[in-house]
Amino acid sequence: MQKKTAAKQNETIIGITALYCRLSRDDGAEGESNSIANQKKLLAKYAKEHGFTNTKFYVDDGYTGTNFNRPGFQQMLEDMEMGYISTVIVKDSSRFGRNYLEVGQYTDYYFPEHNIRFIAINDCIDSDNGEDDFSAFRNVMNEMYAKDISRKVRSSHRLRGNAGEPLAPPPYGYVKDPENKKKWIIDPDAAEVVQRIFRLCIEGNGNETIARILQDDRVLVPQAYWQSKGMSRGGKKTQPNPYKWCKTTIAKMLEQQEYCGDIINFKSYSKSFRNKTRVENPKENWAIFKDVHEPIIDRETWERVQELTKNSKRRKPKNENVKKSIFTNLLYCGDCGHKLWFNINKQNPSIRFYSCSNYKGLRGTCESTHYVREDSLEQVVKMELFKLATYLDHDEDAFAELLEHKTNKDSMAERKAAESALAAATARSQELLRLYERVYEDNVNGKVTDDWFMRLSHKYEVEQEELKKQMFDLKNKIERLDTAQNSSGSFIRAIRKFMTMQTLTPIVLQELIDKIEVFPIEGTGKNRTQRLVIHYRFVGCIDLPSIVPKHTYKLDSRQGVAIEYLPSAV
């Protein structure tokens, strides 16, 4: 009878009740009571006893409470933004977060603005009962606790690290001993690859050559190897090419003293308990323990490799005066679609150029480097923008009409289809809410059994989740199309800004250009040409009327051979 009464009191709750659980890696000292399983049990029991039936768990296992960059919380936040959550329940406020400023932002501002009820069971907090005078104090205490835990963990790590216990996961070639997690043992298959890499280096092969040899022999890169063995080591779940070794990976492996059997701790550290960014530690602060585990590489070989690589190691010069490229993230290969990399000629730093990142000479698949000089590119883009400016100055109304016609033609049909799909999804979503409310009332009145109600509510929830994602994507698509349709004014303003400045800047380029496709050089001698295709923001390629004069740009290269650039889309 009491359960029915409680259910009656909450019968208006038709939104999702979010049951949020969080456990940090540092919370182990708090015991079993804070385990995810026990949090779930407590929250489910509370929800059932208080009539919250449309529940959904959001879980962050192993995430700190000092920031809100957690996948479970971010998913819950997304659902709150969509209006699907009416109540958030946590075991206590520390499970929600330990940063008192951010916790306060949610409990004092965000939840009330979005009409979301917040309940922290063990803290006796229920926003429906009014403000809690101790909430701010409790949030401060939770942050102080997090800071204290962080200090204790750092102290523990310091003690363990100074005692020779490895703090980092074992490098490629080693695994943790199943019988003693504090020890590393050799992984025979990976160790064989490590030995081969050192052997190839001794034979005089550079890092790029070694990487190419391993790729040709279809040797799995470390991340792909760990995944093939079922080991969880983070990183990308899928590898575009699981055999494509990187020369920086080879260089790092050749530097690792751990392969001699040593343990090296404190190579890096985090700035604070809030900021987890790792910072390199000076070598004099490292703790080195020799001959702790079985070596993969003998010390003499390792030291010999350090001598060989000492002079070949290239460090990127930290010259703050080096001019950055204004075309960053704008250049793409016209054949394979990969980005173009920015380079500076070593012999002549005044020559700055781009080349395809997927060139087969770099172990990619593209047949050409798609080499293009930065100075040439600047001249071509300037000419194209001057052409736009000339047409704009000649007839602004005609230019605006050209832009509108271009965007409307491409997006009108697409927007109409998206609007139709969104209307259908919205109607179905509202229908599901009505169906849920009806079956909820039938369950409260005893017309529908709990089992049947749970089946139907689960079915509705799954469909509602799919509709939510569909509606989110459709709204973004419509917004993007609207932005494109209404962009002619901002596009014209950006061109006028260029006309005033008479120079290219990263801001102007980002406002005007979406991407530039670079095609390979064709022809020989003085007949060499290269095509560049400029895709402007929102409107794509623009074919200007014949009143605008056509231009090409000729560059005398270092070899004295002229290259003619054809900037217009063909």
Image: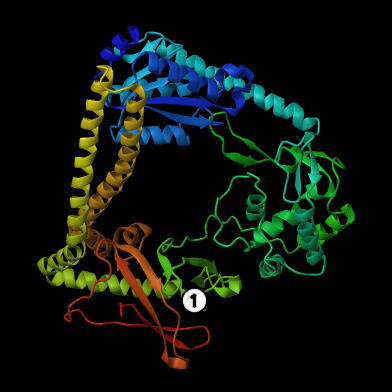
x and y, in percent, of residue 535 in the image: 31, 68
Q: Residue at x 67, y 27 (%)?
A: 154
Residue 364 screen position, x and y as percent: 56, 70
From the image, tell me which residue sits under label 1: 371
Does 273 appear above or below 553? above
Residue 299 visible: yes
Amino acid type, label 1:
Tyr
Q: Nearer the viewer, residue 208 or 451?
A: 451
* Residue 212: % across, % down: 67, 69
Foreground of the two, 16 or 551: 16
Position of the C terminus by quadrant: bottom left
Q: Residue at x 42, y 35 (%)?
A: 74
Q: How is the image coloured?
A: rainbow
Quadrant housing the N terminus? top left
Q: Is residue 570 above or below residue 404?
A: below
Side of 405 where 295 appears, left or right: right
Q: Quadrant of residue 388?
A: bottom left
Task: Give the structural element (helix, strand or loop) at label 1.
Answer: loop
Packing grade of label 1 (10 A; few <14, some 14-19, many >=20) is some
Q: Is residue 24 left or right of residue 182?
A: left
Seen at 22% across and 62% down, the residue is 496
Residue 370 in the image: above or below residue 117: below
What is the number of callouts on the image? Answer: 1
Q: Report which quarter residue 7 is drawn in.
A: top left
Q: Is residue 391 above or below residue 273?
A: below
Q: With 156 as the anchor, is 477 left or right in this view?
A: left
Front position in the image: 566 or 496:
566
Q: Residue at x 50, y 14 (%)?
A: 141
Q: Closer to the camera, 51 or 473?
A: 51
Instruction: Say whether residue 91 is visible.
Output: no
Percent position (x, y) of residue 222? 67, 54
